[in-house]
Amino acid sequence: MDTDEKNGHMHNGKNKTSFKERLRQLIGDRSLRSAAKAWGLPYSTLNNYLEKDTTPSLYIALNISKIENVSLEWLAAGERGEENQAPYHREKATNDDTKMAWQLMFDMLEPEEVNALLRLIHRKGVEHILKCHCDSE
């Protein structure tokens, strides 16, 4: 671990972004007020994180990471943390990636297309189960 002489923050050399930069990434195109509201924070508190280098409590950081669907390790230190995770957490991260891929696909479709796709997946799934069941008898 190294200490950033400019602001006293700890980093491990791999971390290229500061906590403030990661918060700004999560805020994205939203206003500070709307991000603060989404995270259940007063505007002034979020503004202090960005302008006065204050840091949130563990509880608040955890809440933000859950709302924004990022790991606490990434929010706190800029690290994915996957190499240090237990197998359950690596599997969960993979599942989250799969969920995100499905969500992106659904977001590109019209509602009636989503419904048609889901009906097709259900029908083909049932047909496959019935075929496998009949083949095994």
Image (cartoon, helix red, strand yellow):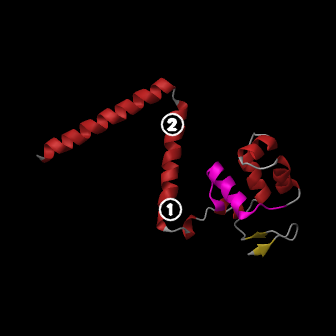
Is the N terminus in the top left, top right, bottom left or bottom right quadrant? bottom right
Name which residue lies at 47% across and 64% down.
88
As displayed, is residue 113 above or below residue 133?
above
**Residue type beneath disc 2:** Met
Q: Quadrant of residue 8?
A: bottom right
Identify the residue at the far bottom of this view.
1
Please tell me how many numbered marks the rendered image carries. Answer: 2
* Rendered image: mark on residue 105: 2
Q: Which residues are magenta?
A: 54-72
In the figure, 86 relative to 49: above or below?
below
Q: In this figure, which residue is indicated by the disc labeled 1?
A: 90
Residue sitting at x 62%, y 58%: 71
| 72 vs 45, nearest the viewer | 45
Q: Earlier in the sequence, mark 1 or mark 2?
A: 1
Q: Secondary structure at mark 1?
A: helix
Q: CA distance from mark 1 to mark 2?
A: 23 Å
* Type of amino acid under label 1: Arg
Can you give x and y, in whole percent of width and height, for residue 12 in the image? 71, 71
Q: Give yes or no for residue 39 being in the magenta stretch.
A: no
On the image, the x and y values in percent for residue 10 come to 77, 71
Number of residues whose C-alpha sits closer than 10 Å to that of mark 2, classed few (under 14), some (14–19) or many (20 or more): few
Q: Is residue 58 magenta?
A: yes
Magenta: main secondary structure equals helix
In the displayed structure image, the side of residue 55 where residue 104 appears, left or right: left
